[in-house]
Amino acid sequence: MDVILSDENFMGERMSDIFLKIHLEGMKNKSQETDVHFRSLTGEGNFNWRMTYDFEYLLAEQKFCTYQRKSIFQIEKEMIKEEPLIHIQVYDYDIFSSNDLLGWTEFSLVAMPPPTKTSRECNLDVYEKPDDEKISIVDKKKMRGFWPVYDDSMGTRELTGKVELEIELLTEEEALAKPAGQARSEPNEHPTLEPPDRPNTSFNWILMPLIIFKILVWDKFKWYIIGAFLIALLICFLGLLIYTSPGAITSAIFG
């Protein structure tokens, strides 16, 4: 992966802490993300990270099939047909603020812009390809290459990165015959993924305790922590009020 550098370190060097998030249309609640490639000084991020998604696909209609409740009062889930889109987002990880979205793309898995073989060839022109040059993963089964990500928040697309992906489509029977764990967890097969080759600069030992705390504790329990802090603050205030009330009442009575 290659992306723009959005931050500066204390030495004034441009850098980014890069991670990738992907979800399928109608399944944002099942989105998955890679780990973080910290302190990339070149814009290159290395991951070797597997994401697997289970979904129903209506072949005749070329639609994803999801089941959702449209309201909290609805007892049974309703079948919803979704366009077979894949959403790819590249972020710069921040500890003390929200993560910065560096670039994104989305495209249909049954009308995919053809990926390029190298990063150098990858540009926004792939999204202008005519329909007869687009590719269906249903027919191809497996594809690998580079797709560009962009920022179009200002009205025009600006190239902000290039993502290398291998996308493979399996039937339920094929998936059971070729088990594979998320990320690099067991069973780490089909294919076996080795830890990414990252430079030593991608590790920041000074900030690592804060990073670990944010990932393992703050991101999961921040509202509980904030709530507990507010409750403790309220208890301290009430305790101080009760402690000072007798003296204040005595002073008010006897002057």
Image: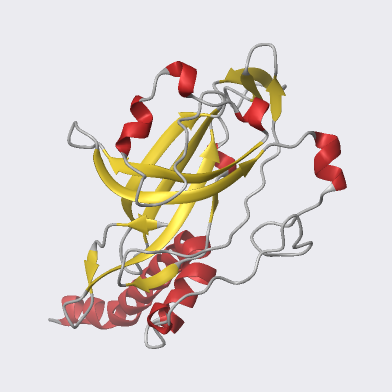
Can I make out residue 77 in this image? no
Residue 73 in percent (x, y) is at 62, 23
Which residue is the extreme one toward the bottom?
Answer: 206
Residue 16 position, x and y percent, is: 31, 66
The structure residue drawn at horizontal position 34% and vertical position 51%, both measured from the top left corner, is 120
Nearer to me, 210 or 236: 210
* Quadrant location of the C terminus in the rendered image: bottom left
Task: Identify the residue at horizontal 63%, vertical 55% (top origin).
Answer: 50
Furthest-top residue in view?
60
Q: Is residue 234 above or below residue 32?
A: below
Q: Which is nearer the eye, 162 or 61? A: 162
The quarter of the picture where the N terminus appears is: bottom left
Colour mapping used in the image: secondary structure
Q: Is residue 222 above or below residue 156?
A: below
Residue 91: x percent and y percent?
Answer: 37, 55
Q: Is residue 149 left or right of residue 65?
A: left
In the picture as drawn, the residue positioned furthest to the left comes out as 255
Q: Decide which of 198, 249 is in the foreground and name it.
A: 198
Tell me what residue is drawn at x 30 percent, y 42 percent.
150
Residue 10 is situated, as x and y percent measured from the top left of the image, at 20, 81
